[in-house]
Every structure is written in C-alpha cells, then in structure tokens.
Image (spheres, grey):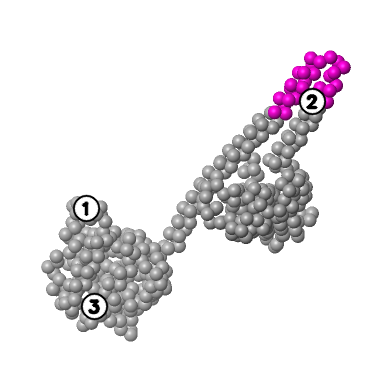
Amino acid sequence: MNNNLPEFEEFCGNSSAREMATHIFDSVKFDIPTSETSALEESPSVSWAQAENILLDLAASFPLGNSPKRQTVHSAGEINVGGVALPEVDARYRTLVEQIPAVVFMAFLDKGIGEAYVSPQIEAILGFSQEEWLNDPVRWYQQIHPDDKGRWSVEAAQLFLSGLPLKSLYRVLARDGRVVWFHCEAKMVRNDDGQPWFIHGVAFDISELKQAEASGREYAGRLKFLSRRLMEVQEAERRKIALELHDEIGQVLTGLKLSLEIGSRLPAHEVGASLDQARALVNDLMARVRKLSLDLRPAMLDDLGLLPTLLWHFEHYTAQTQVRVNFKHSGLEKRRFRPEVETAAYRLVQEALTNVARHANAPEATVRLSTHRQTLLIEVEDLGTGFDTESVFMASETSGLAGMRERVVLLDGRLTVESRPGSGTHLTAELSIVDRPAHMTYSDIEK
C-alpha cells in the first residue's frame, strides 16, 4: 500500500481519502484483466506494485467536497487550486479552448491530482456541468465504461510513471446512460526542477465515427450475405433449369426421336401416322421451350413494359393455380420505368403470388400497384392461413422472402411483411423510381 497517504489526507483535508483511494483501487484491481495485469508486472518500466501506488495516489488526491483547499473560480476568470493561480488557464485561454469541439482539461500533479479545469463541452457531451464534474472526486472514474476501466487504469498508471504522452480510446457513460466514445490525448508537464507539475489534454467525441465504423461492418456483412445468397439463388435456378431440360424437354426429344426412327422403318402408306405423332411432339416441345423462356424472363417485359407483362402473368397464373387475382393499379398506363425497377417489380409480384399458391390456401389474392412522386408502391394481399413473420425471416429457407428483400435492398427500397397465423398476409414494397447513376443495375443480377 502507499506510504504517502497521510500526506494526501492532509492535502485533501479529510481522512476519508484513504477509504476513497482503497475503494477505487479495489475497483481498478477487479476490473483489470489478468492478461493486462501480468503484462504490467512483466514490464521493465512499470510494475504492478508501482501502478498500485500511482492509482492510490491518483484517487486519494482528488479534492473532496469539504476540503478547505478545493478549487475556486474567481469572477475575473482566474482559476486557483489550493491558492495557486494557473496562468495557463486565464480568461483568454479559456475563451480559446472553449471554442474547440472537444473536452479540454487540466489537472495539477505537484499539489495533488485534482481537476483544475474542464471545458464546458463536458455538459453538452456527457450531461454533467463543469461544477458537477470538478467537485465530485470520483466522477471521472465512475463514468468510465466498466469494460474499459481496467485498460484505462493501466494506461493512466503508465502516464504518471513514465511521463510519456497518453493516447487512448475508451467509452464513458453519459448522465442519461448513453455510451460516448472518446479519443483522449494527454501530456504531463514538468516544472523547472524536473518534477511533475500538471497534465493537460483533450478528449474528442468520436461516437459518430464509431457508429459509422459499426455501420460499415454491418454493411460489409450484409453485402457478404447478399453475395452468398445471390450465388445460392443462381445455383438453385440452374438446378431448376437442368431438371426441366432433362425431365420435360429431354423426354419430348426422346419421344420425337423414337417416332422418327419408327417412321423410317414403316411402309410408305403408314408413315403419315408417325409423322403426325412427331409433329405433335414438336409442337409440345416448342410450347415447353417457350414456357421455360418466359419463366426465365418474359420478353414482353423489355418490349411492352410492366403493366402488359403483369396482365399476361395473372392470366397464366390463374389458369395454372386456380387462384384469382384482383388487380388494381394507377399511374402505370403507357409508362415505362428503369429496367431494374420493372424487373424487380415483376419478380416481387411473381414471387408473392407463388407463395400465395403454395402456402396461403386462399382462393383469391389482391395486387395493387401505384406510382407516387418518387416511388412505386407494390402491395400483395391475401386472406389465407398467414404465418409468423419473425420465425420465417429468421429461418434459412424463407419461401422466397429473403430473395424479395434482397431485390428491394439493392434498389434502396423498403419491404414490409405483415402476417399472423390465421389472419392472412399483407406484403408492401416501395421502390424508388428516381433516376440514379447507372453503375448499379439489376440487369447483371438477372443474367
């Protein structure tokens, strides 16, 4: 333990300094991870025993509320601690530093470590007034984030032992509980005798930067997820096409080949029947190829636009699934949108209706499309069985909802799905129809 505590008690004017110092040191010792403690003990310049003394001194030397030598701020702007004027922090200096968008601070070392000055930005950033921050002897330590106290304590001890500048990133808890990130740089100044005199430093609020970094990491993770999903969707589509080519078109071609081979061996008067069968197979083959082509991407979407393509799709959808489509639209007549918008809108409606046919067990679905000033609003609604949206979105297989969400995100749009078991489903998508740079298009994804 520190042998100089009585001297600090005399400086503070209250024997409770020992209790405060011991309390803070116990907290510091508890918070510092074992790895950091070991590193400090092994360091040739900073030992754990020295850090213990430094941190005890640091805590004990804060002026208490009833100290006869507590800091005073005179009306003329001169700041004194223990009756000693601090010329560096006169009114002109304060006028300068208080324009800096950061917390500027200064503290004595030769007569005990007590905050001599803290700029008013402390209140704007953390919600504590200058007086509150300076008069509470352990405020500075209490507000450090619990996860950063150990590391900060080691860095602070090294500053006071070595005199080397301190550069640290740590979190502080504001009055309202917000977590504020600070980039703090502090330096110790010695007097003419080479003894520690005071420290001064500046703490910049970098919370927005940290939030931007977190958003960047989240965005990078999202892009990685989208890229992986895109590859999965492409592979799924390739498997689907391969199966259709093999099971449907391949079978028709095999039948056509057999008919032609049989016809080549028949007498001339019997060839007609075989040719009729082959002709029927060719017609069936052409219909299947046309259907496969339309499923991949209907040519009329490029030639005629969104509205005619949707009308065609609804007709074929009802014929195949027996689910009626109640279609309402406004602002689509004789209007074309960017190719990526038309493609996304068509695929969203197509996938939503596919889900209705597969899962909703509903005889009818309502589709509404309307244009607004800057957006294309798409709504697909059914009164079917519904589902739990949270569990479905969290699942790896989401009945096409994940792909729909990815399409919307790529166009800077918004997708919402409202559904409950037994209450049907209401899907809403908003796509921007404002022209934007061509560097990000959907055509590459479709290919």
Q: x%, y% of residue 399?
A: 59, 48
The reply to whether dot 3 and dot 2 touch (C-beta < 8 Å) is: no
Q: Is residue 106 above or below residue 327?
A: below
Q: Which residue is mark 2?
A: 278
Picture residue at 74% right of the left edge, 56% below the top: 326
Image quadrant where one finds the C terminus: top right
Picture residue at 53% right of the left edge, 56% below the top: 390
Real-space Cα distance between discs 3 and 2? Answer: 103 Å
Of residues 349 and 275, which is closer to you in this image? Answer: 275
Image quadrant where one finds the N terminus: bottom left
Question: Does the magenta stretch mainly form a helix, a strand or a loop?
Answer: helix
Mark 2 secondary-structure assignment: helix
Of residues 162 and 301, which is closer to you in this image? Answer: 301
Q: Please identify, in this view, whether the residue under mark 1 or under mark 2 is nearer the observer.
A: 2
Callout 1, which amino acid? Ser
Mark yes or no: residue 88 visible. no
Q: Of label 1 and label 3, which has the lower sequence position? A: 1
Q: Which residue is mark 1?
A: 38
Residue segment shown in magenta: 251-276
Callout 2, which amino acid? Ala
Real-space Cα distance between discs 1 and 2? Answer: 86 Å
Q: Which residue is mark 3?
A: 64
Mark 3 secondary-structure assignment: loop
Determine if the magenta segment contains residue 71.
Answer: no
